[in-house]
Every structure is written in structure tokens, then in C-alpha cells.
Image: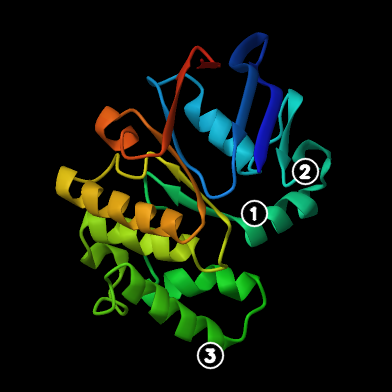
């Protein structure tokens, strides 16, 4: 389970303070599919960054399986990200000099997996998201929807329990977005916890539960 407790994040830019999150309390159960919806600047991405161990709170806490992530070292945070969390970004964040197979296999390289094993698993994951015939294509040779499917396969490379999507349909057309949501729903049925940030009410409606954010707060 994921739990936030009075989670607050303040960014300081010179003498100016921006309070991105204000005392956020949220519980996400194992195998839940939750969408967090709100306008730009509401704190959605900041919340994801903290849940995903990409940043630490100014105050308050994020607990993942009972572990207070704010008390972990950078190595400890990296270990949780590597073993428990898969990330899907709006901008895909693929390496454009690598083909699909190499992009998906890269996280497994950092996890110390053998070359043959990681290439075999990367091919299986690309087939899982419908890109079995695109394994040697580079990102620039694929559509936006195909690039996002490649990013999902990469997010699954280390078999994470939690998938975090920051506007995963925001950079692709409507039909491609529906395909991405179909894949995420399938992953949720497999037992993975899915957390998606979006500003699209139709996308949010496909989640099992929706939370709204405004001005750094989660609204009840």
C-alpha cells in the first residue's frame, strides 16, 4: 500500500517560495487503479514525483509498503524505483539512438541481468504491447502511440508492482490514447497498482477511483 501523510512540498527560487503540495493525505491500495485529475499547476506531477521516489518532501511522509521513503538514502530510493516502480512519461523519454529492443532492455542492464535474458524479456514485453514486429525500429520511426507503448514495455522491464503514468496519453491522439488505457487496464487486472495523472476527464473515468487536485491539495 502507498500512503502519504501531511505531504508538503515547497520549492524555493531565490527568495520566492512556491508551495506545490499542502498537507496531502492519500491512501492507494495494492492493485488499485487510481487517476489523479486537476488543472496545470495543481500539484499532480509533484505528487507523482514524491510517490515515485524521484524527490523528497519538504515535510510529511510517503510510505510504500510501510517504508518511510523520505528517510532513505539516494541509493535506497534508487533501489525502490528499480524494484517496485515503473514510470511512463508524457514525453516518452526514450533514447533515440537505440531501437525498441535496446530501449526496453536498458533498465535490465542496470539491474545486472544477463544480456541474453534481458533481450529475450525485452522482446516478450514488446510483443505484449503489440510491438512484436517493431523491435528493431528506433523511436523516430514509430508513431506517438507506438512510442508510448514502447515506453510502457520499458516500464515493465523489471516487473514492478507499481506503474506511474504522468499524462501518459497527453502527447498522442485519441485513438492511440484508448489503446494505452486498454494496456494499463490489462496490467491492473494482472494485479499491478496503476497511478495515472491526467487533465482528461474521459481518461480519468476509466480508472477505478478518481481524486481531484487543486492548489496543491487533494479534494475530498
Badge 1 crowding class, 10 Å Cα cut-off, few under 14, some 14 to 19, many 20 or more, is some
- In the image, 56 versus 187, the foreground residue is 187
Q: Secondary structure at mark 2?
A: loop
Sequence order check: which comes first, mark 1 or mark 3? 1
Q: Earlier in the sequence, mark 2 or mark 1?
A: 2
User: Label 3, on which residue?
Assistant: 116
Can the viewer see residue 99 in this picture?
no
The foreground one among 196 and 147 is 196
Disc 1 and disc 3: Cα gap in Å? Answer: 23 Å
Q: Position of residue 120 (x, y in %)?
A: 46, 86
Task: Determine whether 48 is above or below 41 in the image.
Answer: below
106 in relation to 92, above or below: below
First-in-chain label (2 vs 3): 2
Tag 2 near tag 1, CB within 8 Å = no
Residue annotated with mark 1? 81
- Residue 90 placement (x, y as % from top left): 37, 44
Is the C-beta separation of discs 2 and 3 under 8 Å?
A: no
C-alpha distance separating marks 2 and 3 = 35 Å
What secondary structure is marked by label 1? helix
Which residue is under mark 2? 66
Label 2 or label 3, whichever lies nearer to me, is 2
Residue 86 lies, with reference to residue 116, above or below; the image says: above
Left or right: 135, with 89 as reference point = left
Residue depicted at x 64% and y 11%: 17
On the image, which quarter does residue 83 sit in? bottom right
Residue displayed at 20% across by 59% down: 143
Please provide percent x and percent y for residue 77.
Answer: 73, 49
- Measured as percent of width and height from the top left, residue 63 is found at 73, 38
Residue at image coords 24%, 47%? 177
Tag shown at residue 40: none
Amino acid at each position: 500500500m502507498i500512503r502519504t501523510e501531511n505531504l508538503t512540498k515547497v520549492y524555493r527560487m531565490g527568495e520566492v517560495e512556491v508551495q506545490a503540495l499542502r498537507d496531502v493525505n492519500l491512501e492507494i491500495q495494492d492493485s488499485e487503479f487510481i487517476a489523479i485529475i486537476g488543472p496545470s499547476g495543481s500539484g499532480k506531477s509533484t505528487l507523482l514525483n514524491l510517490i515515485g521516489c524521484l524527490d523528497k518532501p519538504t515535510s510529511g511522509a510517503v510510505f510504500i509498503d510501510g517504508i518511510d521513503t523520505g528517510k532513505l538514502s539516494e541509493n535506497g530510493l534508487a533501489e525502490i524505483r528499480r524494484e517496485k516502480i515503473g514510470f511512463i512519461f508524457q514525453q516518452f523519454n526514450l533514447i533515440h539512438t537505440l531501437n525498441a529492443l535496446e530501449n526496453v532492455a536498458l533498465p535490465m542492464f542496470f539491474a545486472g541481468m544477463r544480456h541474453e535474458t534481458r533481450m529475450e524479456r525485452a522482446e516478450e514485453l514488446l510483443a505484449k504491447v503489440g510491438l512484436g514486429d517493431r523491435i528493431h525500429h528506433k523511436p523516430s520511426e514509430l508513431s506517438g502511440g507506438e512510442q508510448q507503448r514502447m515506453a510502457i514495455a520499458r516500464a515493465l522491464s523489471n516487473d514492478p508492482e507499481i506503474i506511474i503514468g504522468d499524462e501518459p496519453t497527453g502527447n498522442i491522439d485519441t485513438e492511440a490514447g484508448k489503446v494505452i488505457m486498454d494496456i494499463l487496464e490489462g496490467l491492473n487486472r494482472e494485479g499491478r497498482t496503476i497511478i495515472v495523472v491526467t487533465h482528461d476527464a474521459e481518461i480519468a473515468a476509466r480508472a477505478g477511483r478518481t481524486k481531484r487536485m487543486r492548489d496543491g491539495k487533494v479534494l475530498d
